Amino acid sequence: MKVLLTGGAGYIGSHTAVALIEAGFEPVLLDNFANSHPVVLDRLARITGQTMPFEQGDVLDTPWVEDVLRRHRPVGVIHFAGDKAVGESVALPLKYFHNNIGGAVSLLRAMEAVHAQDPSTAPTLVFSSSATVYGDPATVPITEDFPRSHTNPYGHSKLVIEDMLTALCAARPAWRVGTLRYFNPVGAHPSGLIGEDPAGIPNNLMPYVAQVAVGQREHLNVYGNDYPTPDGTGVRDYIHVQDLAAGHVAAIQALLSRGESFTVNLGTGSGHSVLDVVRAFEKASGRPVPYRIAPRRAGDVAQCWADPARASRLLGWQAKLTLDQMCADAWRWQSANPNGYKG
Ligand code: NAD
Ligand code: UD1
């Protein structure tokens, strides 16, 4: 059974492709390499012993996406493709509205057109949403029925896409959509062959810490130590990308077997502070991670972690891997590939 992964060459898509193969699916990857590198395809072949079908192109190109769907006839689509840098989205909002919202509309129109010609299978979609849709939550842990808001165009784009999917499912009962709200994905495949390869200076904590440990950056700036948290630094729900990948397999299986749409959090249900991450990474790498306390980063919240009970109930999925394992795998990837896929 084929599953189409838009953005399949990216960080989460590549790990999900491996998990899908292990679960007996045939992933078909679609990507324009806007934020990924063709080398990932060789790495995936080394991990899985298989060459995955790959389609190079833009999800905004609706007729081409339709053609890809007609040729492969996937049982479902996982939509990862999009831009994800919060700071860039503030500077370039239209880029985010065009690629993220426009990309989703393009994919949905292609899926609808293919379904209209062959109504025998239900259009089945898993969408990469984010805990960013909860804005600044009033309390933690966060359940799926918390109010949603946005603080930047990236978050706004996720919210709009979620609303579009709700409207589409209301208008077209045949559609089955699983919306996955990821918390903070980190770590890498245990082989060290695939991992997160941010362009330029990393915005997110774990890749920055990894680059400090490997000696590429002098020190970490800890954005604030005066939050109302146990050690004053921000607390997040870091989730191993391998657990996240397993969550996508569980989501596709649930949509195919039960045929009901859902929205779930994918998180571990516990939070770790910035300094917890620094200490765990030092332990995993055996290297020091020097840091300096810096002012708070605009737009950051004090603490954010998931209530993952709904995902457990609906998908039979739970995160299993610890912060130590996240750091050990991130370190294996970073130390073996100090320049990412660029060699
Ligand atoms: P990524 O940038 O590594 O992967 C996205 C992939 O999509 C890239 O390979 C990129 O080249 C491709 N792409 C972008 N625009 C495209 C287009 N128009 N046509 C074809 N391909 C295109 O990002 P990721 O971390 O793997 O994230 C995947 C999804 O998960 C994104 O939608 C992101 O917003 C969402 N998400 C990520 C995180 C995170 O922390 N990584 C958290 C929450 C949600
Ligand atoms: C960020 C995005 C969020 C997105 C998520 C994807 C912002 C405001 N939010 O979340 O929309 O969905 O990435 O993973 O950008 N930190 C430091 N020093 C650093 C980097 C981070 O101290 O150099 C701290 C932050 O203040 C925060 C924690 O580390 O407390 C995690 O930060 P980060 O990895 O950027 O994730 P989020 O801010 O949770």
Image (cartoon, rainbow, N blue to C red):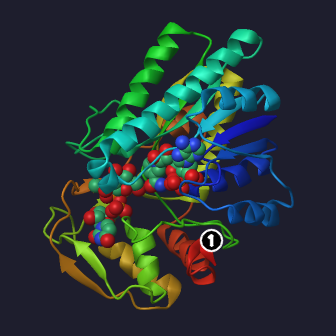
Q: Is mark 1 within 8 Å of ligand 1?
A: no
Judge by depth and name the residue closer to the eye, 38 or 49.
38
Q: Label 1, on which residue? A: 341
The count of marks equals: 1
Specify few, some or many for label 1: CA neighbours under 10 Å numbering under 14, 14-19, or 20 or more: some
Residue at 26%, 39% (x, y): give it: 150
Rendered-image quadrant of the C terminus: bottom right
Judge by depth and name the residue closer to the eye, 171 or 20.
171
Residue at 57%, 9% (x, y): give it: 173
List x then y, in percent, for residue 181.
Answer: 45, 41
Mark 1 residue element: helix
Task: Give the left or right position of residue 243, taking residue 93 as reference.
Answer: right
List x then y, in percent, for residue 275.
Answer: 31, 76
List x then y, in percent, for residue 49.
Answer: 86, 61
Residue at 59%, 66% (x, y): give it: 195
Rendered-image quadrant of the N terminus: top right
Residue 343 sits above or below residue 133 on the image = below
Task: Give the left or right position of residue 235, taking residue 333 as reference.
Answer: left
List x then y, in percent, for residue 281.
Answer: 45, 79
Residue at 80%, 32% (x, y): give it: 72
Judge by depth and name the residue closer to the eye, 63 or 224.
63
Q: Amino acid at mark 1?
A: Tyr
Which quadrant of the structure image shows residue 112? top right
Residue 9 sits above or below residue 70 on the image = below
